[in-house]
Image: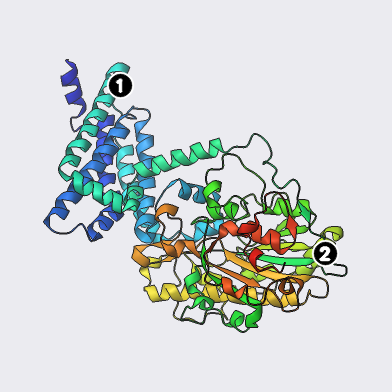
């Protein structure tokens, strides 16, 4: 049989042949598992009129041909079925999450998924996900598994057929793209998020890219030392050591804080504090759009621009503060500190210190705790720290569960739900948007209570310390704007809702820090642009720590200090 006839035979509609299975599965995934992409394409304002149908059909054909071309290289009898089953199930799950929340699957999202704990994963599960996996993934996968085994073929013949199918698929992509190239180029340039919605090709690329980055980031040894010369500035005789409570918020967006002009009273308790003691910065940008990206960047002295290019791990703010001689403690009510707290004392909320009373009923349900649990047993936690370090000062970090979605209704206690009715489902797109916002705003009110009670606890420490509080969220959140929910969009195309975060400073009147600043200067920072880049240096300046990595120009309070 001639090579041409052999190649033509491989494309006969015989479902036992690997190439036939590849192209049938590619067509299924392109047409059905990419339904969120086709819905988004049809909703674009520049994709209207009669040509919209032709453009969408060409796009579907290109996705099917590109998928088939790539998978043709894997069309080996002992490999192809397993590969296609995994891809079909994965594409079905992705169709649910992309279609329901508008998320995109890039290498950063892969990192987020790897670092997500069981509690967060559980909130994303539901019957709609199961239905999508069953209909779009399990159904065709079961059909594939029931196909008879392909007849034996010579290795070279199989290789030639696979390569030929790949070339034909790529040729089809080119032929389909040529008539619509102008619109295709304009659409992909204007709407960059579309490229992250192509399933499963983008997912395979993102998994590979994330794995390559992870492998490249494996340290050969301990993280590089920074701030080796860390030290504390001398204090006046009799001055109390600093106590900075650094509250790291989760998924809070600045625009939903009434302190920043939001019409709803989401910050009633903070608003009741003396205005001279509290300053809310209204124009703060995050390092990233997800915890895995933002948290390490926030605690680095480099700033976002340099941090994203960091090739090897290095120490962070907590290491430098501890090296300077301060006591440092990290308390976590979420999925962990992303490696930041490994070298300093740290604990989870459920890990009660010796001598602490049991957690009050209702704070924890056995699976997760409300953020108020962070305040429980604090005196006992401090008593367990090195007393010599405590005498020099303390930086206490509280990592919130905050407003983590999609189950926003779980983030506020039953007695603190002022905005009703609230969405009580993790399928946000199935709730009226006003109910989604209600549930989210209730979580902001819960953060307001946590911060106000933290201030009350800090006031009780004034006989021993010079206290202060700095609150900042790691990233924001989309609540249905432009069809997007949750967070994690690539930073370059992320909406403001995911990068505009709250930052709040509290300094009691009569404290050493407040006395060292020019009157009214901190209030003047309210509307000045700021970012996570300044957190490291602001904290260093706040507690009187210095090192070669400290940049006064990035210290928010430096310009306000009296000479």
Q: Quadrant of the C terminus?
A: bottom right
Q: Is residue 185 above or below residue 77?
A: below
User: Could you say which is closer to the camera, residue 54 or residue 18?
Assistant: 54
Which quarter of the figure has residue 159? top left
Residue 235 numbered mark, or none: 2
Q: How many marks?
A: 2
Q: Is residue 469 above or below residue 488?
A: below
Asked whether, in this view, residue 235 is left or right of residue 151, the answer is: right
Q: Is residue 300 above or below residue 354?
A: above
Residue 159 numbered mark, or none: 1
For the view shown, which residue lies furthest in the top direction? 1
Residue pictured at 39% horizontal, 51% vertical:
93
Residue pictured at 32% horizontal, 51% vertical:
194
Q: Quadrant of the N terminus?
A: top left
Q: Can residue 373 be seen from the camera position used here?
A: yes
Q: Residues within 10 Å of mark 2 (few under 14, many from 20)?
A: few
Label 2: state its secondary structure.
loop
Question: Which mark is in front, 1 or 2?
Answer: 2
Asked whether, in this view, residue 361 is left or right of residue 163, the answer is: right
Asked whether, in this view, residue 424 is left or right of residue 166, the answer is: right
């Amino acid at each position: 049989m001639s090579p041409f006839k052999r190649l033509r035979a491989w494309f006969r509609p015989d479902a036992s042949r690997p190439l036939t299975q590849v192209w049938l599965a590619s067509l299924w995934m392109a047409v059905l598992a990419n339904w969120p992409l086709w819905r988004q394409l049809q909703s674009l304002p520049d994709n209207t009129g009669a040509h919209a149908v032709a453009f969408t059909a060409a796009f579907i054909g290109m996705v099917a041909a590109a998928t088939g071309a790539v998978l043709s290289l894997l069309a080996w009898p002992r490999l192809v079925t397993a590969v296609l089953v995994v891809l079909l199930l994965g594409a079905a799950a992705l169709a649910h999450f992309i279609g329901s929340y508008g998320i995109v699957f890039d290498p950063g999202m892969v990192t987020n998924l790897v670092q997500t704990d069981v509690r967060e994963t559980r909130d994303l599960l539901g019957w709609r996900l199961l239905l999508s996996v069953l209909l779009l993934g399990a159904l065709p996968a079961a059909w594939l598994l029931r196909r008879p085994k392909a007849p034996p073929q010579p290795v070279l013949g199989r290789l030639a057929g696979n390569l030929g199918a790949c070339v034909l698929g790529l040729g089809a992509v080119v032929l389909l793209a040529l008539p619509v190239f102008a619109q295709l180029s304009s659409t992909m340039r204007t709407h960059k998020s579309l490229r992250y919605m192509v399933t499963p090709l983008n997912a395979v690329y993102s998994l590979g890219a994330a794995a390559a980055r992870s492998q490249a980031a494996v340290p050969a040894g301990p993280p590089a030392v920074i701030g080796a010369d860390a030290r504390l500035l001398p204090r006046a005789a009799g001055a109390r050591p600093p106590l900075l409570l650094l509250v790291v918020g989760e998924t809070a967006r600045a625009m939903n804080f009434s302190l920043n002009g939001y019409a709803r009273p989401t910050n009633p308790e903070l608003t009741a504090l003396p205005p001279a003691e509290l300053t809310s910065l209204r124009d703060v940008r995050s390092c990233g759009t997800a915890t895995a990206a933002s948290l390490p960047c926030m605690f680095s002295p480099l700033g976002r621009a340099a941090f994203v290019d960091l090739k090897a791990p290095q120490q962070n703010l907590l290491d430098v503060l501890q090296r300077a001689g301060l006591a440092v403690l990290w308390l976590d009510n979420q999925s962990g500190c992303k490696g930041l707290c490994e070298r300093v004392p740290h604990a989870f909320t459920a890990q009660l210190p010796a001598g602490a009373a049991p957690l009050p009923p209702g704070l924890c349900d056995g699976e997760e705790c409300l953020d108020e649990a962070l305040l429980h047993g604090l005196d006992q936690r401090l008593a367990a720290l090195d007393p010599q370090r405590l005498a020099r000062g303390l930086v206490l970090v509280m990592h919130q569960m905050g407003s983590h979605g999609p189950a926003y209704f779980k983030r506020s206690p039953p007695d603190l739900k002022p905005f009703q009715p609230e969405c009580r489902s993790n399928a946000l797109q199935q709730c009226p948007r006003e109910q989604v916002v209600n549930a989210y705003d209730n979580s902001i009110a819960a953060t307001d209570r946590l911060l106000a009670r933290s201030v009350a606890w800090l006031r009780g420490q004034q006989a021993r310390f010079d206290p202060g509080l700095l609150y900042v969220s790691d990233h924001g959140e989309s609540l249905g704007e432009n069809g997007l929910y949750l967070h994690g969009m690539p930073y370059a195309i992320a909406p403001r809702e995911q990068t505009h975060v709250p930052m709040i400073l509290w300094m009691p009147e009569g404290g050493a820090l407040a006395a060292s600043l020019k009157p009214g200067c901190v209030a003047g920072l309210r509307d000045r642009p700021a970012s996570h880049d300044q957190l490291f240096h602001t904290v260093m300046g706040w507690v009187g720590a210095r090192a070669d990595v400290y940049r006064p120009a990035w210290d928010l309070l430096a310009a306000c200090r009296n000479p």
